[in-house]
Image (spheres, grey):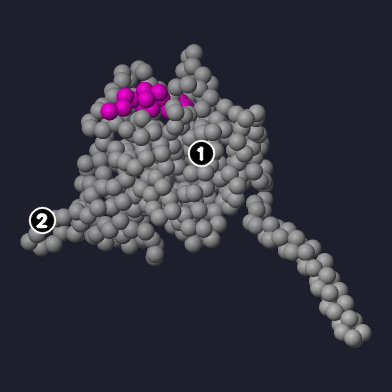
Amino acid sequence: MLALKKTVVTVISAALLSLCVVSPAGAADKDKTEEKQPKPTGPMSTVGGARLGQVGTQVDLGPGAPVLPKDLSARSWIVADAEDGQVLASHNAHWRLPPASTLKMLFADTVLPALQPKTLTHLVTEDELSGVGEGSSLVGVKEDHSYTVHDLWLGVFLRSGNDAVHVLSEMYGGVPATVAAMQRHAEELQALDTTVVSPDGYDAPRQVSSAYDLTLFARSGMQKADFREYAATATAEFPGEVKKGKKRKSFEIQNTNRLITGDIGVEPYKGIAGVKNGYTTHAGNTFTGIAERDGRVLLVTVMNPSSEESHAVYKEAAALLDWGFAASGKVTPVGELVPPKSAVVSKGSEPATGKGKEGTEGLEGKERAAGTTHAAAAGSSGVWTALSVVGGLLVALAAGAFLVNRRWPLPDLVRRLPRR
């Protein structure tokens, strides 16, 4: 009996001791896990403000401001006002990371204005497709087939087609010339975290960008009517193969931006107006989006969230947009989206610091706000009004009303066209 009691006491003591040992160990393991989370290893840029160069989350909540969404796993993200350029919150905004296909925003912003008109037709050669990386996303461009510039841009924006990117690059002057032009344009936009190696965002050594820079690319691109149209298109018809003796048919392509088209576990985001998603092995998932609600336009970029949850990049982007709309006017900005180097100030206007009230597109003195857009029908009643215009509406202004160099932010005339 005494032996039995000793045995029980020994077992209980061992159990209690194990609890005392396991609990601290569990806490230590948690700390070690947090320590293993990737962080920027060197100093980051302070373009747009000193706070944006600091490691970790930057936000200054005012009275009544909602807290940031919980469980954000992205290595880097940013929420900014697309019009006045104020950064509402950020996390490692200048961390240089692989951008994946979000780099196509810079490609389009650089190349699109030069390839006009969009009805221009091009016969694709074998050489133009030879440089497409293995495993690339493709829209289905075929050699010895003709496509319009419009077709190819739909392939870039909707299907993230690297085949379409390479053909457009060749039309622009070749891949090396395109890469060089993209790098120059990035520097003009003060996107100094970006090093361009491939025009399509395909993984390449030393190719990096940042959440801050990707947001600048989106903001610049959205100045252009054609860019806005392609970025907001949900579905389109793409030319198919030419078969002997038969009329050439087309097939439907759908935008891979799930905040526009939706997917299992992801609802189309109300007010979404683009712009671009991406994925590669090294970059993980990346996404930049723009949305309008109650007259306010926000930009959000999310880079490399956790891969454990399906569609995490869209869910975190949507949560940050929701937070941004709720927090607008209730937070102190932690930085700003800077204007391009060439942004100028006209007499009597606001300084070009991202805080003015007007802007210009500077496209040969005319605002090209024409085109039929195809923003997602489901839940898109709040889409940016410039993207709601259908038909051939053309707004042409006198050349003297615009400067060749753009001022920021977006011109009200473009953004607030009447709904139909």
Q: Position of residue 381 (x, y in %)?
A: 36, 35
Label total for image: 2
- Label 2: state its secondary structure: loop
Residue 412 shown in magenta: yes
Quick one: quadrant of the C terminus?
top left
Nearest the eye: 147 or 391: 391
Nearest the eye: 414 or 5: 5
User: Is residue 270 among what the camera can see?
Assistant: yes
Q: Which residues are magenta?
A: 404-420
Residue receiving disc 2: 247
Q: Position of residue 386 (x, y in %)?
A: 35, 30
Figure quadrant of residue 336:
top right
Name the residue type under label 1: Asp
Residue 226 shown in magenta: no
Residue 372 as seen in the image, left or right of residue 331? left
Q: Residue furthest right?
A: 2
Residue receiving disc 1: 322
Q: Magenta stretch: dominant SS?
A: loop
Name the residue type under label 2: Lys
Figure quadrant of residue 15:
bottom right
Kindly identify the residue that appears in the image at 19 percent across and 59 percent down.
241
- Label 1: state its secondary structure: helix
Marked residue nearer the N-terminal end (2 or 1): 2
Residue 161 as seen in the image, left or right of residue 331? left
Figure quadrant of residue 143:
bottom left
Q: Position of residue 224 (x, y in %)?
A: 36, 34
